[in-house]
Amino acid sequence: MNRLNHNTLGVLQEQSAAELPFTESHFCRQLCMAGEKYGISVIVFHAGLIDWDTRTVKAYTYRKNAWKQQHFPLPTLIYNRLSRSHHERCDQLHIRNSLQQLYREDVQWLSRPLPGKWNLYRALSRFDFVKTYLPKTYPYHGPRSLLRIIKQQNGSVFLKPSGGQHGRSVLHIEAAAYATSSPWSPTSVTITGRTKQNDHIDTHFTTMMDALRWVHQFIDGRQYVIQPYLTLLSQQKEPYDVRVLMQKDGSGHWQITGSAARVGSSGHLTSNLRGGGRAEPVESYLEQQFSRKQAENMLSSIAHISKQIPSAIESCYGRLVELGLDFGIDQKGRIWLLEVNSRPGRSVFSLTGNEKAIRLAVENPILYARNVMVRHLRRVCP
């Protein structure tokens, strides 16, 4: 069994220590069920399950209310659900080597990880339609680079990992009584945020030098970006943003699958659901924060820009099947594009009860995969 499989969608996941050895098992089960509904075979695997001698994979599929594992020919169409940092966290050499071999194969990728926030910012900055929505972004190159930007931003900046961490490992630095003439003189520096384990951070320093040293140790060689601190709070002083899920449909066109407001707890920096946030229907939530007319105009602007972003990103990085776009709205009503994620979650729609979005969020990747398969068959079967 050494032929490639042209009629199956392979879902490439990260390895897990759970009973099922891959991540997102609930979502993968939904994909398998949607595939059965639309006549598409869906298998789930991680790179360590590939046998390169036989070019097969010992993958999982969900049938008759149960997971089954068996050997399949290696699929040539793959829905890549790996995070950009997977290579860095993959400590098993044979899995890392197998993944690198898979990337060299002549397969079609339904999606792919995007680069880090700094490179993505530079790419998007080339497009005039989105430039004004982007917070100014700088790479972290050590304490001196951070100090320079703190000065530029009047003592208040936001740091976040270049790779998405679901709101973890973010920092807000607020320097009061900032001394521009002598940055190492005593001052009041407050740092709030979240650790890698998602624990809350609230620490204070009396000198800028101590604060910068602490931040540098916290970052610990990881890639970070620095941005101005934007006040993205509701009238109730809760952080919130607007998540928009863009997906290709069965005809290969980008559509808005759904949107929702994600609302964090008062005193926290982010609205991520994994950090204790909640989801609200976006229309009614924005109407609570602004007037109905303002809310309508904001959502119209967000929809307009959301429909333009995917093709711009594809022109830089190749084919994608979906994107999660996160927009912030400051207290003056200005809209900011905060995040672009090629591996978006879908739980906001379950939490808001948006049944249509719940269904489409799972079915659209399957329908688009079928579209790609049909086009492939037309090329090879004249």
Image (spheres, rainbow, N blue to C red):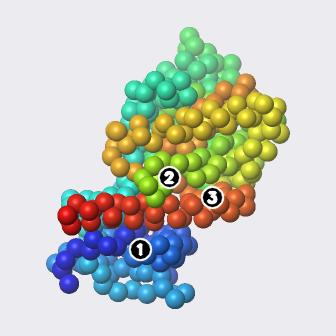
Q: Is residue 317 above or below residue 186?
A: below
Image coords of residue 364 (percent x, y) = 50, 60
Circles 1 and 2 in contact, beta carbons < 8 Å: no
Identify which residue is drawn at 22% across, 60% down: 379
Q: Earlier in the sequence, mark 1 or mark 3?
A: 1
Cα separation between marks 1 and 3 = 21 Å
Q: Of helix, strand and loop, which one carries label 1?
A: loop
Kind of residue indicated by mark 1: Ile
Q: Which mark is residue 215?
A: none
Q: Earlier in the sequence, mark 1 or mark 2?
A: 1
Question: Is residue 244 or residue 140 the one in the foreground?
Answer: 244
- Label 3: how many residues lie within 10 Å, few (<14), some (14-19) or many (20+)? many
Query: Mark 2 — residue?
Result: 247
Query: Mark 1 — residue?
Result: 40
Q: Is residue 231 visible?
A: no
Q: Could you tell me which quadrant the C terminus lies in?
A: bottom left
Q: Of helix, strand and loop, which one carries label 3?
A: helix
Image coords of residue 183 (percent x, y) = 55, 19
Query: Mark 3 — residue?
Result: 357
Identify which residue is drawn at 73% across, 54% down: 278
Kind of residue indicated by mark 2: Gln
Identify which residue is drawn at 81% across, 34% down: 292
Circles 1 and 3 in contact, beta carbons < 8 Å: no
Question: Is residue 178 or residue 80 the one in the foreground?
Answer: 80
- Label 2: how many residues lie within 10 Å, few (<14), some (14-19) or many (20+)? many
Cα separation between marks 1 and 2 = 18 Å
